[in-house]
Image (cartoon, rainbow, N blue to C red):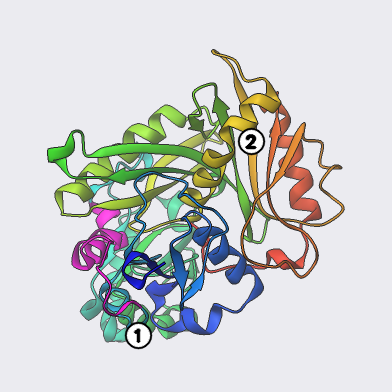
Amino acid sequence: MSASTELALLPNLGGEEGDRWRKMRTEPAVASAAALWCSLFGRSARVAGSRASPWDEPAFDWLPTDGALAWWGDTSASGDPALAGKRWRGAAPQATEAVHDKAFAAGNGAPPPALRGVSAVFEPDELRCTDEAVPRLQEALARWPADWRRQFCLKPRLGSSGRGRVLGRDGDPDTAAIRGALPRLARCGGAILEPWLDRTRDLSVSFLIGEARDGPPLHLLGSLTSIQRDAGVPLGHHGEIDSRGRIYSGSTFDDALREAGSELALAASERGYRGPCGVDALTFRGPDGADTLRPTVELNARFTMGIVALGCIRRARDELKRQLGVEPGMRAGVVMIYNLPEGDWQRVGADFVLPIRTLARSRDGGGPAILGCRDPERLDAIVADLRDTAGPSTAKPATRED
């Protein structure tokens, strides 16, 4: 294969935090996540000149087979020496950076009524002088209902995996932790101030944003529920698959999640973004104790592990439908787990287990896999068991969607 027909990949997971991703890329969990991303592509995919995927064809027909592409396609990635001389296949970096900024989702998303007007966006200049920033934070918090002021957080507008956020309590931002974090948050493009919610489920919906001249600019890839341990360590995703191979989160909020996500993705399209994206959402326990959907936490203008999971399930959909007997009008449960420890393949209680092929080698003999069960209601027990048995190789990667 000639160099002109190769696809150069840059697996810069966590690239929103600058060059830190280069130091993290050899960590087992990060390397495993990168290998899963690379496995979405076909035989032409290369990382640093070496074959990146064991598959002949891409998981999605819209994935390129030549040129250059990054996990996070900002200005730095598009000019990376590893991609030099290749045609850039990602979205325009300026558009990527604009809509990936958490302020974009804060200004264009659809918060539930209880959170309308609560989140506040701070520019870098507003945070650089700590003595001036703290009173601004106090003013914003004073406008919140008392229930939301009990616990709050400041999170970087450009960041990955939930890192870099700082917590506060009782409406008081004048603490050593917050003061110490403000200069760092200024360097991360500013911050978002919002309540720390008692979340009950993490959800996501993924799209491909295309050119409007080619028809409707949005192509729905699917929605999923994220599997995490109590400490926030991401383990995988689960959902439901129907007889047409469509993938749903399995949540009662799925329709609302998809509708709100579509509106935010369309807003990103209007800002010039083209390519894959994921909209993070969550459900939380409100002051009245009821579960409430927050459908647009942020927009990830890049590949996500949710998109990776959807691609892996898409590759396996025919086998899943056959093994699970999925007929029109029914859905089966599916789980994509990043690392299923060796010895647990059969004991997890799934009807079907399919290892996922990547070029990474697992240190513990396990590896990524798709689990299927005919009855989606059995997913909760399977997921709970996976949370309990997940080993150290699932240590927090650079890809938690938070």
What span is colored magenta in the figure?
Answer: 83-107
Q: Which residue is drawn at 47% across and 78% down?
A: 21
**In the image shown, does 265 or 181 lie closer to the viewer?**
265
Q: Residue lying farthest top?
A: 329
Displayed quadrant of residue 9: bottom left
User: On the picture, is 72 further left or further right than 13?
Assistant: left
Is 285 rendered above or below residue 363?
Answer: above
User: On the picture, is 352 further left or further right than 58?
Assistant: right
Of the two numbered discs 2 and 1 in the rendering, the one whose residue sits closer to the viewer:
2
Comes first in the chain, label 2 or label 1? 1
> x, y percentage for residue 296?
36, 46
Q: Residue lying farthest left?
A: 213
The residue where tag 2 is placed is 334
Q: Dot 1: what SS?
A: helix
The disc labelled 1 sits on which kind of residue?
Answer: Pro
The residue where tag 1 is placed is 183
The disc labelled 2 sits on which kind of residue?
Answer: Val
